[in-house]
Amino acid sequence: MAKLHEFSFELLPHPPYSPDLAPSDFFLFSDLKRMLAGKKFNADEEVIAETEAYFEAKHKSYYKNGIEKLKDRYNRCIALDGNYVEL
């Protein structure tokens, strides 16, 4: 939410459980999953620290570009009357 506010993006409502429209599922978590793949952690704090470092290392343009790519997905969803948007 902080990044959305930072870039002055308006939060648009979308259907629940729509990974094709949720920024977290669309581009944030897929990259994070790849980065964490195969790593072992001994404590929750280690996972939290690694995740925070990952997102802090991303340039502002990473978030801006990812959110801007949602525009096309939202438009396709609108054209399909709210149905699932194929990737």
Image: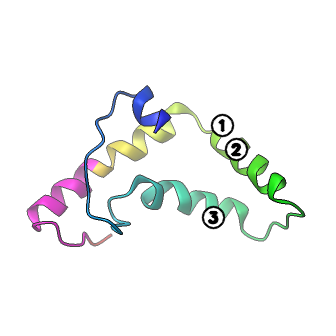
Magenta stretch: includes residue 83: yes
Q: Secondary structure at mark 2?
A: helix
Residue under label 3, please give it.
33
Image point (50%, 40%), residue name: 62
Span colored in magenta:
71-85
Q: Quadrant of the C terminus?
A: bottom left
Q: Secondary structure at mark 3?
A: helix
- The local crowd at label 2, few if under 14, some if 14 to 19, many if 20 or more residues have their Cα within 10 Å, is few
Q: In the rendered structure, which amino acid carries the disc numbered 1? A: Glu
What type of secondary structure mainly makes up the magenta span?
A: helix
State the separation of the CA atoms marked 3 and 2: 13 Å
Residue under label 2, please give it.
52
Residue under label 1, please give it.
56
Q: Are marks 2 and 1 in contact (CB under 8 Å)?
A: yes
Rendered location of residue 56, percent (x, y): 66, 37
The mark closer to the camera, 3 or 2, is 2
